Image (cartoon, rainbow, N blue to C red):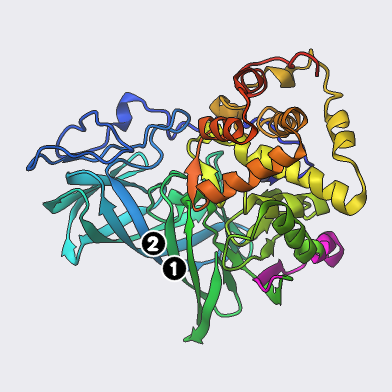
């Protein structure tokens, strides 16, 4: 992710939606037991429990859910942009989500994340199921308990008005004058589809989005169809690569679609919002060259397609998988490189916990610096020297790179210090080991998630050195490391 102006600020006070007060105990037919959550369990035969209401992420405790693994999302969405945008930015979203889920525990009920939208009907394998909804949790009660390992299909019909006041710091889907746009990171997917909204649950996706004729709907992957009937166009997108829900994209509005391909043949589908100044996104012409450079450096591009959506409505860029989105003023050369690099670092290998975000942002920022050296002749060391002008007594050095507070998730400690940590590691272990580490990281954990501990262990394995002091100083402790 990158916000306009380059400076990535702390988010300030976060919304209260997920801070668990006594009122946020879900309405439920039986009390939720404390359970181990993310690992499959093998309880005694005949013991069925409630899936937990979160995967236990320290920064977002109720993100994702226990006892389930979503394998596929089939999302049928109908959206009407604000009818009178000059007076009210309110759009209307109606959806039918069909999720193929594998139980990882014996379940009598389970949760999905769904926020600011109302479920009207839920069915499991075609049978109507009981459900309740409270505080962002959709609690679904199975007519018959499900055993660990069993796969089932859940259909949820849901709807809601979308307003700009939904635009909280956790992310979401926001109406714009001509449509709407999603910025899911870190926990906004539940504002447009029922999801197991934690990076650790990757799934394939298919989107069928119905919008008024003349309006485009962009999503991840390959465009299968854009059929118009009765004054509406349905845009069908297939995203077969494993994807975390925070990387799903829905951008609706007046867009010009442009098709091309990268030097390696990867199809590229870009979408340019109506009225966006062409000069503002001319750096996107470098995308193919950037992709070739990152493939040479890090390994093959991991997905079926790429593309970029340029929209004037928000000042944020986000590395939505296979199709990054760029808000107002963010299509600079280095941010185009940043979001492309994220396809390897963040999208292909995703964070095991939100506190591991520096492995997304540190790598994407460092890849920017490498591109700047490769393409513009600006040495990485010169960029490092500039960032190191941040003096040892500056408050930026007090943030914890691998253990940020929730308010500091998108902070200097995660981005700049994250990239500096990688440079310091490179200086210590040498270029060859550093690049071998990057490639092995992507090959070993690609399509999945990994943690800071996994990264430290792999760096030690590749370099053959004990790096505990190095990482302690750089990512776990505050303060500018000695000798830097
Ligand atoms: Zn980023």
Q: Secondary structure at mark 2?
A: strand
Residues rendered magenta in the picture: 264-285
Which quadrant: the N terminus? top right
Residue at the image position 68 percent from the left and 69 percent from the top: 271
Report the residue marked by disc 1. 206
Residue 441 drawn above or below residue 211:
above
* Foreground residue among 118 and 407: 407
Q: Which mark is residue 19?
A: none
Q: Is residue 179 visible?
A: yes
Q: 62 left or right of 185?
A: left
Q: 39 left or right of 189?
A: left
Q: Secondary structure at mark 1?
A: strand
Residue at the image position 87 percent from the left and 29 percent from the top: 385
Which quadrant: the C terminus? top right
Which quarter of the rendered image does ligand 1 occupy? top right
Report the residue marked by disc 2. 73
Residue at the image position 25 percent from the left and 31 percent from the top: 35
Labels 2 & 1 near each other (Cβ < 8 A): yes
Q: 69 left or right of 223?
A: left
């Amino acid at each position: 992710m990158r916000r306009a102006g380059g400076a990535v600020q702390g988010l300030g006070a976060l919304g209260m939606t997920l801070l668990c007060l006594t009122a946020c105990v879900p309405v439920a037919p039986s009390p939720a037991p404390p359970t181990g959550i993310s690992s499959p369990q093998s309880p005694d035969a005949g013991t069925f429990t409630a899936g937990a209401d979160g995967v236990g992420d320290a920064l977002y405790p109720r993100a994702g859910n226990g006892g389930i693994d979503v394998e596929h999302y089939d999302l049928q969405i109908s959206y009407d942009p604000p009818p009178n945008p000059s007076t009210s930015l309110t759009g209307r979203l109606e959806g039918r989500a069909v999720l193929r889920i594998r139980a990882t525990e014996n379940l009598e009920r389970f949760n999905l994340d769904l926020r600011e939208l109302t479920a009207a009907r839920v069915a499991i394998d075609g049978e109507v199921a009981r459900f309740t909804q409270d505080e962002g949790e959709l609690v679904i009660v199975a007519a018959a308990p499900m055993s660990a390992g069993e796969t089932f299909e859940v259909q949820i019909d849901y709807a809601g008005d979308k307003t700009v006041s939904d635009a909280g710091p956790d992310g979401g889907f926001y109406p714009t004058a001509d449509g709407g746009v999603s910025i899911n990171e870190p926990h906004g997917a539940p504002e447009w589809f029922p999801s197991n909204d934690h990076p650790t649950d990757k799934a394939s996706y298919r989107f069928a989005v119905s919008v008024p004729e003349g309006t485009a709907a962009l999503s991840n992957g390959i465009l299968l169809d854009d059929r118009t009937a009765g004054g509406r166009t349905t845009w069908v997108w297939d995203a077969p690569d494993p994807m975390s829900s925070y990387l799903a994209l829905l951008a609706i509005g007046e867009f010009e679609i442009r098709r091309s391909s990268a030097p390696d043949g990867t199809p590229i589908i870009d979408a340019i919002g109506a009225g966006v100044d062409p000069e503002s996104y001319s750096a996107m012409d470098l995308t193919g060259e950037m992709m070739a450079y990152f493939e040479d450096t890090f390994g093959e591009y991991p997905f079926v397609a790429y593309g970029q959506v340029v929209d004037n409505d928000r000042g944020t860029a986000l590395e939505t998988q296979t199709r990054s989105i760029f808000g107002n003023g963010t299509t600079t050369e280095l941010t185009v490189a940043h979001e492309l690099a994220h396809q390897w670092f963040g999208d292909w290998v995703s964070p095991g916990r939100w506190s591991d975000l520096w492995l997304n942002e540190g790598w994407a920022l460092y890849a920017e610096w490498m591109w700047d050296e490769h393409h513009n002749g600006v040495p990485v060391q010169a960029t490092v020297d500039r960032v190191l002008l941040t003096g040892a007594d500056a408050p930026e050095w007090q943030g914890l790179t691998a253990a940020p507070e929730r308010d500091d998730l998108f902070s200097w400690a995660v981005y700049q210090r994250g990239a500096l940590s990688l440079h310091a590691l490179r200086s210590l272990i040498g270029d060859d080991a550093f690049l071998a580490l990057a490639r092995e990281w992507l090959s070993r954990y690609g399509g999945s998630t990994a943690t800071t501990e996994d990264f430290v262990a792999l760096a030690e394995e590749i370099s053959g050195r004990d790096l505990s002091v190095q990482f302690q100083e750089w990512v776990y402790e505050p303060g500018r490391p000695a000798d830097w």
